[in-house]
Every structure is written in C-alpha cells, then in structure tokens.
Amino acid sequence: MPDSLIVTHPASATQATLNITEASIKAADLRQFRIGDEPLAAFDPGFTNTAVCHSAITYIDGEAGVLEYRGYPIAELAEKSTYLEVAWLLLNGELPTTAELEAWEQRVTVHRRVPEEVKTVLAGFPASAHPMTILMSSVASFYSFYPDARNFDDPESRSRALVRLIAKMPTIAAYAFRKGRGEDYVAPDDDLGYCANFLHMLFAQPGRPYEEHERLVRAMEVLFILHADHEQNCSTNAVRSVASSGNDLFTCCSAGIGALHGPLHGGANEAVLKMLREIGSVDRVPEFIEGVKAGKARMMGFGHRVYKNYDPRAKIIKKSVEDVFEITGVNPLLKIALELERHGLEDDYFVSRRLYPNVDFYSGLIYEALGFPPEMFTVLFAVPRASGWAAQYQEFITDPEQKIVRPKQIYTGHRTRSYPADGPR
C-alpha cells in the first residue's frame, strides 16, 4: 500500500497529494484537494468508505479477522477479564490496577438504582411495549434527573454521567423484561457482581432468590465483553452525531439505542433462530444450502460488513454455547447450526464470497437457553454496548478535530422555478 496518492481533478487539472493512513480502513484526507474554495467531497452512501474520526478505542482488521480493544485481542479479554474491567479499559485506555478495579466496581454498584420517578415512567408503558422502546425512553429521561451531564467539559461531571449510564442500564433492562412478564421489579443486590446482579434482577422470584450458576454468569460476562464496542458502526455513529450538536451522554445513547433497535443492526440473532426453526432438522440443511445458492433463501448470521474472515467473536461465542448447554441442556437447534457452519466453511460458494459465521450466529442460542424471549436479544446487545458508547462519546467531545455533523448531498431535484401567476392547478 503506497504512503500517498497523487489525484488529478479531471475538469480543472488541479493536483493534490493525498497521504494514506493505515488504520482499520485505508483512508485519505480529501480536505487538501480543493476545487476553487471548496474541498473535494466524495459521494459515499452509508459512509461505507468514509473515515469520520481518529480513534484509539477499537481496532478491526476485517481481512484478517482481528478485533482489539485498546490493543488487547478480544480473545484474551474474553478469557481473562470481566466486563467492568473491559469497560474501564475502553474509557481510560489502560487496564485497571487491582485498586482501581475495586474502586470502579464499587462506584458502579453505588449507582445501580434508578430514581423512583423513572419507575413511574416505566409504569406508564403498556405491558406489550417493546423492551428496547422502554430502554431508549428511560435512558433519554436520565438527563431530566442528572442535568449536570451536559456539563461534559468538566471531567468530574462527565465521569458521573459515564458511571451512571453503565451502572443503570442493566437495572432498566431488567425492569423492562419483568414488566413484559407482569412481574414486580427486583432491586439491585449490592453483594453481587455486575452480571450476576443482572441475572438476579431478571429472574429472582419472591421467596425464591435466583441462584446464579457460576458458568452462566461467566457466559454473560463473555457476551458482554464481546459486545462492548465495535468502532464506527451505525449506533456508535448515531451517538457521535447527536453528541456533535452539544448533547449530554444520555440523550446521545438513547439515539444509539434507537439505531440498534433497527433489525438491520441489532436484530440479526433473532433472525438466525427463526431461520434454524424454519429449517427444522439437520436432514434439511443440504436443501436449504441449495436454496441459498439459488437465491431463494438467505443464510442469516453469515457475512459481515467489516469482517471478510471468521468473526473473532463468533469463535468465542461458540465455546460459550457449549458451556451454557452443559448447564441448561442442549437446544436441538445447535445441531442444525453446526451443520450449517460446516457447509459454510467447506462449500466454495460461501468460501469464495468470504461469508463466515458472525457474532449473531450463535448468540441467540445462548440467550434463548438462558430464558430470554427474542424481543430481549437486542436489549442484551445494548446493555454492554453502553460502555463502548460512553467511551466513543468521551473521545468525541474531547477531540478538537470534531465539529457538528453535517454531510453534503448531491441535489437531484428541480432548480429555480417561478410560482404560477394564477396559482397552482
């Protein structure tokens, strides 16, 4: 890959040397290439080939199947860390010391509870309300209770907002889950860790406390670590865009939740389960594969916008599936999933197109085994992603390069027209 590229504008013959940056993508700064007084602009629907920031949080090499948080490979973090340790890493750039981690965990624990008025907001939703809608609305409401969050130039105010978001997301998610089941809320248990407490708030029953299994708690930790951040995806871009107009963390993250709620971003694992059920048995997998090749069916959970190799998160989740099923019992859909994966990794149709299993291919099986209905799957994506959004928000508002987001357009409509003298017909 060259270090620079000389570009010539065909109309004006103007030339500019563009420096090429080696990063998650290969990017060139077009601002130095000007047409008159205007910098060169690219037409790029979906920003698929546009770099909008410099970031030191998450590195992805889609060609090699690499994912790193602050330089640490995702596999090592999933094996050795806890979610809150990873959250600290994303926010601060380094792994915490033992003392820092203990203080951080205690601080998160202190902020788990939500204002009583938020529970009133929750009570106003119908039982049929989607939990993502409840989560989005509740997070947006936090600004009303913590208005100092807009004082984000002050490190102390910003730090309070960050910890409040990360601490309260599981509480709101558990409230939304129990509301849909017609069950009373369960208060946080300060004697439990982050993920163990989340499972407790979800599943505890009066007179019968939820006894969390260590391996199930660990599986939740791993899932949370894998979903903590994924650089400039749709929801993260939404958080940064809303932040660009000077908004607080809670308003920005409610926008991120809204973006994640879209089925093209956060709903793929539910689609995988639906596909597995429609296939029905291992014997029907070859028929389904042929349907995919003929364009009559779609292989959900395969392929990724960034990864052109095996999604590193999928390898880790596959191991977690085995651990969870040893406790909960094996879902018969797993055999279908494994057979689909075998075909996908061996069949030239998929190999030549670089369609490999992604993080969503196995995650839905775990969530279902843990007792979650499909409408909660995206919520379980949003809760851990809060730490990534918080880190991205912090990086954005402290970056002097950033400004209010305002993409250009290519206008295709009419130009100046006269209003009819006798009025419109």
Image: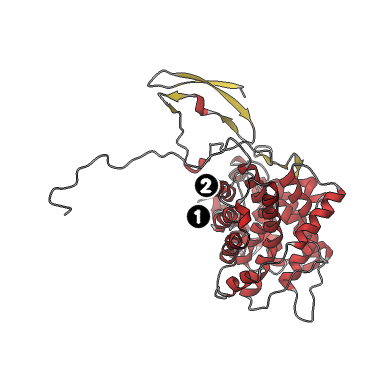
Q: Which residue is mark 1?
A: 296
On screen, residue 14 versus residue 213, left or right, reads left
Amino acid type, residue under disc 1 in the picture: Lys
The one nearer the camera, 2 or 28, is 28
Which quadrant is home to the N terminus? top right
Q: Secondary structure at mark 2?
A: loop
Q: Which residue is mark 2?
A: 245
Residue 310 percent location from the top left of the image: 68, 44
Q: CA distance from mark 1 to mark 2?
A: 44 Å
Q: Residue furthest right?
A: 98
Residue at x 47%, y 38% (from the top left corner): 44
Q: Is residue 307 visible?
A: no
Would you identify the image quadrant in which residue 166 lies?
bottom right
Q: Nearer the viewer, mark 1 or mark 2?
A: 2
Would you identify the image quadrant in which residue 191 lies?
bottom right
Residue 57 percent location from the top left of the image: 69, 41
Q: Is residue 117 visible?
A: yes
Would you identify the image quadrant in which residue 377 lies?
bottom right
Amino acid type, residue under disc 2 in the picture: Ser
Vertical comparison of 348 with 329: above or below: above
The one nearer the camera, 227 or 314, is 227
